[in-house]
Image (cartoon, rainbow, N blue to C red):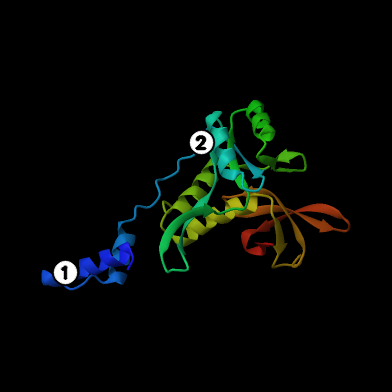
Amino acid sequence: MSGKTRRIARRRREAIAHGRPPADRAAEIRRRRRRRIRPARIVLAADRVWMVAETRPRWAARAAGDLEAAGIATFEPREEIELTSSSGRRRTARVPLLHRTLFVGLHDDHDLGRVEGHPGIARVLFRDGRAVVIAPSVLQGFADAITGHGSGEGDGDAEAVRAVLFALGDGVRVTAGPLATLRGTVEEVDVGRRRYRVALSLFGRETPVVLDEEQIERE
């Protein structure tokens, strides 16, 4: 009999000796979950220019630590998930929400140079020679949504997440209107109007088209 099994058996004997029913394992798990404290709110610097960096495989956390130590603000979106081992044991883990993606808050071009020169950074995202920049308020809304500090309204939190994900420059597909089925890349985001300027492949060249949020979906 293992030490853990002996401890459980002893607790059951003690509970019975004191006239208490043995602990309900499922109820105990639920109680422990309720005691978990949600992650602290992540406050992002509003005076920085937030750009998007793609990290090399398995470098995101290390790159974030190195850049923070150098005075450059970073944000690596992570979410809490519950993992269950083969033995049935459960644990909570914080895993990256976006694959090899790190947001970096910069003061100037010198900071940009240090980010690009870090061995763990594969590239900083640019589109047509312009950096992909995320407005601090949009990125803050995204951080609040994934850490449980959002508005509490599902639609508002989902909008904050979509605004950032589309702004990353990922490929999208048009789902409605005369341009349906065409594919392109998001170049600009109008969060207030929920519109996106998308570079679509038309007649052999990239043509910018403004589309509503409901007209596009990520590839």
Residue 1: x and y, percent?
32, 68
Instruction: Write the residue at 31% across / 62% down.
Output: 3
Q: In x, y percent, where is residue 74?
A: 55, 38
Pick whichever, 165 or 116, lies toward us.
116
The disc, 2 or 1, on the residue closer to the chain's N-terminal end is 1
Kind of residue indicated by mark 2: Ala
Q: Nearer the viewer, residue 37 or 142?
A: 37
Element on which disc 1 rests:
helix
Q: For the residue carrying disc 1, how many other residues have a C-alpha within 10 Å: few (<14), some (14-19), or many (20+)?
A: some
Marks 2 and 1, how far apart at CA: 55 Å
Q: Which mark is residue 46?
A: 2
Residue 101 appearing in the image: yes
Task: Give the residue at x 77% y 64%.
Answer: 182
Up/down of 172 relative to 136, above or below: below
- Closer-to-camera residue (2/33): 2
Question: In x, y percent, where is residue 121?
Answer: 67, 40
Q: Which residue is mark 1?
A: 15
Callout 1 amino acid: Ala
Snapshot quadrant of residue 183: bottom right
Whether 107 is drawn above or below 96: the answer is: above
Quarter of the rendering containing residue 18: bottom left
Report the side of 180 relative to 38 (left or right): right
